[in-house]
Image (cartoon, grey):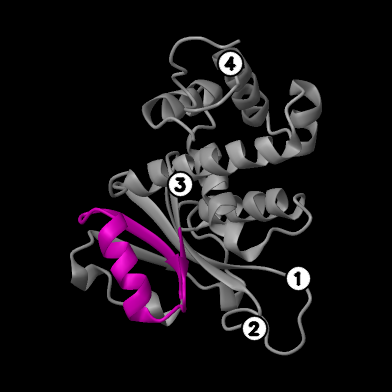
Amino acid sequence: MVTGRNRYIARSHLSEAKVRQIVRLFAMDLEATKIAALTGVSRRVINRILTQVRARMAAASEAQGPLRGTVEVDESYFGPSRRRGKRGRGAPGKTIVFGVLKRQGHVYTQIVPNVKRATLRAIIRGRVALKSIVHSDSYIAYQGLVDLGYQKHFRVRHHDHEFARRRTVHINGIESFWSTAKTRLAKRRGIRHEYFYLHLKECEFRFNHRRGNLYQALLDLVRKSPLK
């Protein structure tokens, strides 16, 4: 019988040691089915715990301050790879995600309803510190960032098959993150729409802690905001 207050999860028969084991296996990127098998905890309980852990990862990501320095901005489309009709910007049936990445640093992502200038500018203003150097592609929505107060704005012309200029003008960092996130989400073999945000933020959190101790970071989150 578990006695005393569990620092990680309230009103549960699980011990602190068991919760730490679940979090450690999650940090190792094991799927819920494998975690359930290794811990002896039901898949239903594991799913509930992991959903709450992802929610705390998302909250921590949303709480990070504006990125500053040299940043890259870009939007990407998540969803089925094959759809009839239009491709690229405006492709039907896709979830649009906008991202901001500080080179050699953190990334921030946000699901957006469209890629209009007002939509993207509002996020840039809120998530990129003024006086930063911004890199983007040549999409018209990114025009005029220097007028908003950003130090410099460099653009690569993807439509002209230009992907880098002078080795420093590019958005390779954010595009690499998109590729990693899509590969990771594809392995989940279909994520329900209502859970896409949490899985996206999990990708973001894992990326932002790629050089640190992810297990300890997750334990700190759960200790600060215990699960239910």
Query: Can you identify the residue that label 2 sits on?
Result: 92
Distance from disc 1 to disc 3, alpha carbons, whole Å, reads 26 Å
Q: Earlier in the sequence, mark 2 or mark 4?
A: 4
Q: Which of marks 4 and 3 is nearer the N terminus?
A: 4
- Residue 81 is tagged as 1
The part of the chain drawn in magenta is 110-138
- Residue 58 is tagged as 3
Distance from disc 2 to disc 1, alpha carbons, whole Å, reads 11 Å
Distance from disc 3 to disc 2, alpha carbons, whole Å, reads 26 Å
Q: Earlier in the sequence, mark 1 or mark 3?
A: 3
Task: Please tell me whether residue 8 belongs to the stretch shown in magenta.
Answer: no
Contact, mark 2 vs mark 1 (Cβ under 8 Å): no
How many C-alpha atoms fall within 10 Å of the one at disc 3: few (<14), some, or many (≥20)? many
Place of residue 113 in the rendered image (x, y in percent of width and height, measured from the top left)? 46, 76
The amino acid type, in three-letter code, at marker 4 is Ser
- Residue 15 is tagged as 4
Q: Which of marks 2 and 1 is nearer the N terminus?
A: 1
Residue 134 falls in image quadrant: bottom left
The amino acid type, in three-letter code, at marker 3 is Ala
The secondary structure type at the circle numbered 1 is loop
Question: Which of 91 and 187 lies nearest the eye of the viewer?
Answer: 187
User: Which is closer to the viewer, label 3 or label 2?
Assistant: 3
Place of residue 223 in the rendered image (x, y in percent of width and height, measured from the top left)? 42, 24
The secondary structure type at the circle numbered 4 is loop
Residue found at x 79% / y 37%: 33
